[in-house]
Image (cartoon, rainbow, N blue to C red):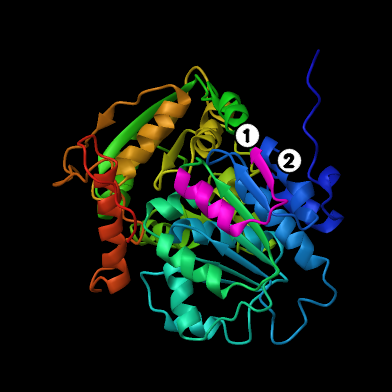
Amino acid sequence: MASAPAPTLAELGLGPSLAAAAAAIGWQQATPIQAQALPAALQGRDVLGLAPTGSGKTAAFLLPLLQRLLDEPDLPARRPRPLRGLILAPTRELAAQIAEDLHVLAPQLRCVVAVGGVSINPQMMALRGGAHVVVATPGRLLDLLDHRALQLRDLHCLVLDEADRLLDLGFAEEMAHLRQALPAQHQTLLFSATLPEAVADLARQMLRPNALHLDVRGEAEAALAGTAAPSITQRAIVVTTAQRTPLLRHLMASEGWQRVLVFVATQYASEHVADKLRRNGMAAEALHGQLSQGKRAQVLADFHQRRLTVLVATDLAARGIDIDRLQVVVNYDLPRSATDHVHRIGRTGRLGATADLPGLAVSFICADAPGSEAHFRLIEKRQGLRVGREQIPGFEPETVASPTAADPHGGIKGRRKSKKDKLREAAAAAATEAAAPPTRARRSGR
């Protein structure tokens, strides 16, 4: 007997306007985590959701949060703006992606991104007059609370995205401080790819007794297995971060690429990379969620009609676009998940592959970016494939980062590490030692 089709997001309780906005960016049929989490979250219930990265967790927490805000009478017009939603993410890149999704879904709401590694002053200025939603990394959130630039007394919903990574990266102390600053009555949505004891303990502390506990990890992994398109040739090129754009130009010239879709992680990266390509005489444009509808339509028309050679896009902006006979897809920034990887490269396999024009997907693995190699290995594992690593003559990296290391704060050139960054690094190192095989007393706290 065939299984019932997945419900639409509208059928799960979203209002017509938000459901239409979600459908416009490709969020229409609910994934397992969305189908189970949305009804409870829309009712104000706490949720613990366990699902792998790329299974639709962002929509599972963002849509009910936005729907409840949009249902509040006159909220967009109220001054100062009351803070209703706080979303914590482990990295700056993830915070930026969540904020971009939010802006496209509900542009009438003010969202401020607050992350470390950059000056706090512009973020404090952005919070003057208030914000309906703040997307933050934990350390910078506490900095803003210390500066009294942010008040949590009006908070309705707290979201912890990728809670296992938040704790792996040494944010346990920040989470303890945050609990003390939260109002007594609020909703908590906690999502994680795994459930180590630290996350289970955090859930016990943060969630109310009637919280809904969901685990769709097996279902989501089964759906993903074997989804990579067989007509696509995949390549993985090891290069330094700074050499990615020169390498892209070199490959286009030396291998005769005529039309290329380049995927990047953020709106800023799409504009920055497109600008660098244009400065070197290439017909390139950015495609991201904050383009006006008119500009977006013009960019896509130019790419369809081959007036553009390179389209530099974010995942969000590229959802739903149809491009025939697309020769090459480049992962300039690696995708967040194996699912995103499948969706990206499938644009060349599904629409571009023919007998004389096979699809090609090229991923840049940054030798100087800790965790880049490990992340691509995880994508390979979940797709059940192995892609050989290449180095292009003239673009060989001088040093290669440890494949398992990770630096979520991505130090900024010319800036000294803060005390908090040093403490987090020490905590991460201690956690690594505690997990090592030699018998050694496990660290009990920071």
* Chain part drawn in magenta: 197-214
Image coordinates for residue 147, horizontal then vertical, percent: 46, 86
Look at the image and say whether residue 199 sits in the magenta stretch.
Answer: yes
Report which residue position mark 1 lands on.
216
Residue appearing at x 37%, y 40% in the figure: 375
Q: Is mark 2 on a helix, strand or loop?
A: helix
Residue 137 is at least partly visible in this image: no
The three-letter amino acid code for the residue at tag 1 is Val
* Marks 1 & 2, CB-CB < 8 Å contact: yes
Look at the image and say whether residue 302 sits in the magenta stretch.
Answer: no
Rate crowding at label 1 as few (under 14), some (14 to 19) or many (20 or more) other CA atoms within 10 Å: some
Above or below, 44 relative to 359: below
Image coordinates for residue 119, horizontal then vertical, percent: 38, 78
Quarter of the rendering containing residue 423: bottom left
Q: In this view, does 438 lie to the left or right of 337?
A: left
Q: How far apart are marks 1 and 2 (CA)?
A: 9 Å
Above or below, 210 relative to 74: above
